[in-house]
Image (cartoon, rainbow, N blue to C red):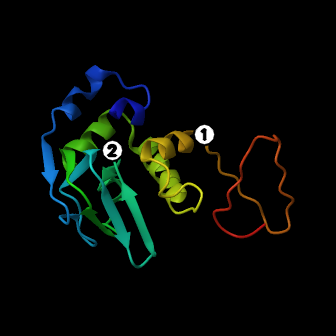
Amino acid sequence: LLLAQLPDMTPEQLLPVLNAPMVTFNPGTIILKKGAKPDYIYLILSGVAEFISSEFEIQNYLSNGCFIGDVSLLKNIASTGTYRAVSYVQALAFSASAYRSFLEKHQLVGWMKNTLDKVHFLQNTALFGEGISFMAQSAISQKMRSRHYEEGETVVIDESRKLCLVKRGEV
């Protein structure tokens, strides 16, 4: 599962991470509260959790392969919303400091931040939001390219098999 998330990682390199304990959350359990900094990063193995942010009017469902707390850890910010178990959730619980050390050791912090920014953008679109798994969003994010256009500039799409999404502004 983690091999699909992290580029060019061998199972041997992942051993320190894979030794994390498994935890179970009952339905309705708050996993990470809005405004809190995570002590643990959770990788959902089974079940469904939800992310709720009334401030940004977001409600996303998370299932196997999704991380909880990773954005807060990587950006060194408090959680922007609340994560709650919708069903029984089994997850690997990584110490936040150990997870960060692992990413730093393998020089993956920048890659992970970039990937999460793109996935977060996809999750907040009607087309790629809640109906697509985190694994699929992550795979799509690896193919995404960002382009900036000035006001009045002509948008040229160089291939017929591209989908363009507008992050900010209008076309």
**What secondary structure is marked by label 1?**
helix
| Depicted 31 relative to depicted 112: above or below | below
| N-terminal-most mark, 1 or 2 | 2
Residue at mark 1: 143
Circle 1 crowding by C-alpha within 10 Å: few under 14, some 14–19, many from 20: few
- Given residues 54 and 145, the one toward you in this image is 54
Residue 122: x %, y % from top left: 54, 55
Question: Is 47 displayed left or right of 147 in the figure?
Answer: left
Distance, label 1 to label 2, CA atoms, is 22 Å
| Depicted 152 relative to depicted 21: above or below | below
- For the view shown, which residue lies furthest in the bottom direction? 55
**Kind of residue indicated by mark 2:** Asn
Marker disc for residue 124: none
Q: In what quadrant of the picture does the N terminus appear?
A: top left
Residue 63: x %, y % from top left: 34, 49
Can you tell which quarter of the image residue 153 is in? bottom right
Answer whether labels 1 and 2 touch (C-beta < 8 Å): no
Q: Residue at x 53, y 58 (%)?
A: 121
Residue 156: x %, y % from top left: 84, 51
On the question of residue 86 being in view, the answer is yes
On the question of residue 76 being in view, the answer is no
Q: Residue at x 24, y 49 (%)?
A: 42
Residue 78: x %, y % from top left: 29, 67
Question: Is 141 displayed left or right of 154 in the figure?
Answer: left
Q: Residue at x 27, y 28 (%)?
A: 14
Circle 2 crowding by C-alpha within 10 Å: few under 14, some 14–19, many from 20: some
Can you tell which quarter of the image residue 110 is in? top left
Residue at mark 2: 64
**Kind of residue indicated by mark 1:** Lys
Q: Residue at x 70, y 70 (%)?
A: 169
